[in-house]
Amino acid sequence: MAIVQAGQAYPLSDLEAEVVIIGAGPAGLATALGLALSGRRVTVLESGGFAPVPDYGTGDGRVRGPMPYHNLSESRARGLGGSSALWGGWIVPLGDLDFETRPDVNLTGWCMSRRSLDPYYQRARSFIGVPDAFPYKDWSKANEPTFRNSPFVTRSFPAMGRLQLGHRHAELFTMDSADLVLGATVKRIVTIADGSAVDHVIAGTAEGDFVVTADVFVLATGGIENPRLLLASANKSWPNGLGNSYDLVGRYFMEHPHVDAMRFQADPGALDTDFFTQRPAGLAADGEPMAVNGALVLSEEFCTAQGIGGAELFVERAGLHTMGRIPLELDGQPHPLRNREYPANELALVTVTEQVPNHNSRVVLGDTRDRYDVPHPVLRWELGEIDLRTVRNSVDAARDLLLALGVKDVRKRLRGDEWPDDTVGGLHHLGTTRMAHSPTEGVVDSNCRAHDIRNLYIAGGSIFPTSGYAPPTLTIIALALRLADHLVSAGA
């Protein structure tokens, strides 16, 4: 029934709750809303304040080879709404193929079908504010025989712009069944003696620590913080970290590589580059302006036949790829992104591709600690041969299409087996507490419950067993709403 600041407007006394949600980002908010609307008592603990910002102390971390990655503090935000403050608002669901087990490219698929998630996608669109009637657009070249013989399909989607989902849904905490405690950084999850259930969490504030007990705990702090907290909560029953009997917590970190893969020249009007550019598309449900964008997408049939991941491709003015990006770093050193002027008629083909699960791509605990004595995370982002082949095959197919459509001076930017040094990520932190039917293959089960810990659930992108190519926020929210329904129906 309130939003309070721990240790200031709110006394540092121990708390009791029915359901505790750790983190007030998109996953935490959607789970809290679903539970509160069903009458469950929910307390949300959020490390940051009312306005989400990077935290250069608690949110710090390091990037260790082989791939450079964005500064970890700046690529996340703490506060009400979490990293939705960094999100561009692209509304794209996963495809049917993303949910399937594909022995050639992934470890396991999802513990559900795409069809079972469809009703939650609809609710997630409503949660975000996408109106039922949306003006999608078409690429004019899709009507030409040349395009129809290519392995691409077109896709347009809502682009909501910078959304602050926390402020959009702050009224949730005016309900009698929901409380939000800001400035409360959970530093440890404590289990009962045999490790089969969570007993309480310890939250740190500037004024000291307090304890929160509950019947159910939902960890919703993102793809880097979720494994960090589980690993940092090791105890006698879980010596390698909570839920980590098979050394899977923190593994299979996935991102969406963004690669400026090909340059060419063409008449923008003749090529219909407008399709790939965000254009106004009316108003969202809250009256704010929204846009529509478009992309070329590899067909699922092509991906299956080629044994590659999914990909979406954009045509844009050369040089836009690295503009406004959060800085990259590697092994404690900055990794500069080159920016220079390009001819006005030079265009770039930018690929955004699926990363297949990689056992060595992972988050671990480092040697340094934050102000609450929790080890900082260390990220190793590792891409594999299939990921590079996905980019190569998608670029080759696009080159054939664009040449047939009359482009000139085509130059591919991939060299040998090396990723271009301006390869960036989408700030999509996925897969580090992956979903699987068995604890030997994943950290949570089909209902997002940690294997062998009966009252600990995990929400957010960390539970993705595959990444697809689509921006993950819509799916994160849909899964969180599904989790809330499960908790209500199970009486958990």
Image: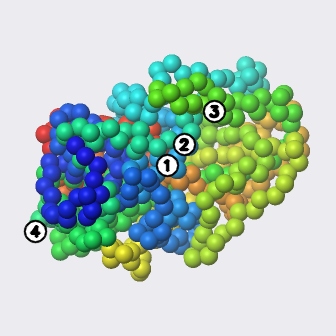
| Amino acid type, callout 4 | Ala
Q: How far, Cα to Cα, is label 3 from label 2?
A: 15 Å
Mark seen at residue 293? 3
Q: Quadrant of residue 315 in the image?
A: top right
Left or right of residue 306, residue 78 in this image: left
| Amino acid type, callout 3 | Asn
Q: Earlier in the sequence, mark 4 or mark 1?
A: 1
Secondary structure type for disc 1:
helix
Q: Residues within 10 Å of mark 3 (few under 14, many from 20)?
A: many
| Amino acid type, callout 1 | Ala
The residue identified by callout 1 is: 85
Q: Which quadrant is the C terminus positioned in?
A: top left
Residue lying farthest to the front in this orientation: 9
Q: Residues within 10 Å of mark 2 (few under 14, many from 20)?
A: some
Q: Earlier in the sequence, mark 3 or mark 2?
A: 2
Q: Position of residue 202 (x, y in %)?
A: 22, 66
| Amino acid type, callout 2 | Arg
Q: Residues within 10 Å of mark 1 (few under 14, many from 20)?
A: many
The residue identified by callout 2 is: 162
Q: Which quadrant is the N terminus positioned in?
A: top left
Return the residue nearer the eye: 299 or 168. 168
Return the residue nearer the eye: 299 or 491. 491
Task: Please tell me which residue is depicted at 57% across the width and 51% down the height of the picture.
Answer: 426
Residue 177 visible (yes or no): yes
The residue identified by callout 4 is: 193
Q: Earlier in the sequence, mark 1 or mark 2?
A: 1
Q: How far, Cα to Cα, is label 3 from label 4?
A: 53 Å
- Do residues under tags 1 and 2 come within 8 Å of each other at their CB atoms? yes
